[in-house]
Amino acid sequence: MMALCGWWLIHFLVFTSCSAHDFFTSIGHMTDLLFTEKDLVTSLKDYIRAEESKLEQIKKWADKLDVLSAAATQDPEGFLGHPVNAFKLMKRLNTEWGELESLVLTDVSDVFISNLTIQRQYFPNDDDQTGAAKALMRLQDTYQLDTNAISTGELPGSSSTSSAWSTLTVDDCYDLGKVAYSEADYYHTELWMAQALRQLDQGEPSRAVDAATVLDYLSYSVYQQGELERALEFTKRLLDLDPTHQRANGNLKYFEYQLAKQKKVEKVEEKEEETKVRQRRESKDDYLTERKKYEQLCRGQGIKLTPRRQSRLFCRYYDNNRHPRYVIGPVKQEDEWDSPHIVRYHNIVSEKDMEKVKELAKPRLRRATISNPVTGVLETAHYRISKRRATVHDPQTGKLTTAHYRVSKSAWLGAYEHPVVDKINQLIEDVTGLNVKTAEDLQVANYGLGGQYEPHFDFGRKDEPDAFEELGTGNRIATWLLYMTDVQAGGATVFTDIGAAVKPKKGTAVFWYNLYPSGEGDYRTRHAACPVLLGNKWVSNKWIHERGQEFRRRCGLNETD
């Protein structure tokens, strides 16, 4: 049953301001960069051909004169005794060498430099590169990937063809380590500097990095993590390569002193420390944070799909109580989860319509903004993920803010903008039986490198009573998610409270209620979008609100009815 299962998600939107690039937050926008780079390579080859043509002309002239001067200098007087040779010498020195000078000074790079200058304004910046590096490290943590697997491009779900182009050099690994170091993330600094060192030890050449530099970072990063013995080991190896390294010589004495001091203390407190470590480990094992649950579910671990629960999940042809549109051609409905009830509709939107939605959204993809809870000014919200933004409601102000725990870009499409959007809105109403006139516009999202959306609710909680006040349509009663691409690896939607995981499947839509019939929020619907490990994820969602559903989904008397 779950073989058909897919995955729901969309929330993790990320809009980009006009002044910021944030290319890495949208694979759709990053594809444009590939074509930009292809054009630049073509321009570069044209420049190379122009330079080669110029050099070929110079080389032919030089070769000709080399032969001539060699012959002439053997008998200068006899050579110049011929009036033609004398004339041609005067002509060469007065005219032809000047022409050669002009040829040498001719700059054939103008076209290439002009093209590069124009395109450079659209290039990623330092923040983009840093964000992409952090995304790789996020994938590394979530899916427990070895640095060597990432460096060789051998990721789960990747093909041998893609891996050939997807390897990291020594310099790449070093740069990843430097990004982690700049963030005081010494754990990832150690991992990536160690990988750079391994590749250097295997004989891989480096453009700008040597083993001594890498060892310098390694010794400091492990020292910052409290591993004095390893810090000392790396420092000694560094000094073997460069005995005059001033910082390493100073660190050597300091590490040796600290290690001797530590050993004295350890003898006195060894038993007491062992007890404390054991207690910390037990506490760590007992307390599984939501973040860890989220990452486990992303890896396919801890899913609570028991045989008993699976026996309650069915597939069926669904006509929504004999809706005229579906009496003859019912839709394929599949249960993804029993409680809360999460369903998937298969082959619900055509390939042509999905492509049109992506085409409409792509030029408008941008990072979302939210109002600062203190200043009220629109800005980017720094919740978790470095450079990603999405439109979310601030719990304090109820106003839209940019969320960093979403890594993507999104666009809003109104029904009036294109018949396909109106068609999808009508489809949602026909299938769910809910009024979509009070729903939010169709939101289209494209996830970027390591795109994710951390655990969240779609509905407004009691502690944020004004979450959707500006809309005037009540709370978000239900969520409809349409998956417009398959994802090679990662990108699952996980429900952290109930232990459910749903994978993306192109052309299917997932639907669930966020509120009980009583209007109370169903906290079991807390969910998250796992980072996209491989592939390009496009989704669109419709948040349906309470207003207009009074006779379509009647209220319940009990809080959880």
Image (cartoon, rainbow, N blue to C red):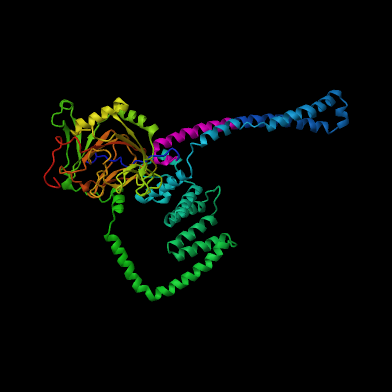
Quarter of the rendering containing residue 473:
top left
Q: Which residues are magenta?
A: 20-47
- Horizontal and vertical percent position of residue 516: 17, 44
Q: Position of residue 103 (x, y in %)?
A: 69, 30
Q: Is residue 505 left or right of residue 57?
A: left
Q: Is residue 139 above or below residue 488?
A: below
* Residue 167 seen in the figure: no
Q: In the visual, does 264 lie left or right of 105?
A: left
Give the quarter of the figure containing the N terminus.
Answer: top left
- Does the magenta portion include 175? no
**Residue 114 relative to residue 299: left or right:** right
**Quick check: 128 above or below 72?**
below
**Image point 82% across, 28% down: which residue?**
89
Q: Looking at the magenta stretch, what is its main secondary structure?
A: helix
Q: Residue furthest left?
A: 557
Q: Nearer the viewer, residue 361 or 552?
A: 552
Q: Nearer the viewer, residue 325 or 459?
A: 459
Q: Where is residue 245 shown, x and y percent of the image?
A: 58, 61
Q: Does the stretch in magenta take in 25? A: yes
Q: Is residue 455 visible in this depiction of the protein?
A: yes
For residue 364, which quarter of the picture? top left
User: Which is more toward the observer, 110 or 164?
Assistant: 110
Q: Residue at x 23, y 29 (%)?
A: 426
Residue depicted at 16% across the width and 30% down the height: 319
Q: How many marks?
A: 0
Counting from the top left corner in percent of width and height, residue 448 is at 38, 41
> Residue extending furthest bottom?
268
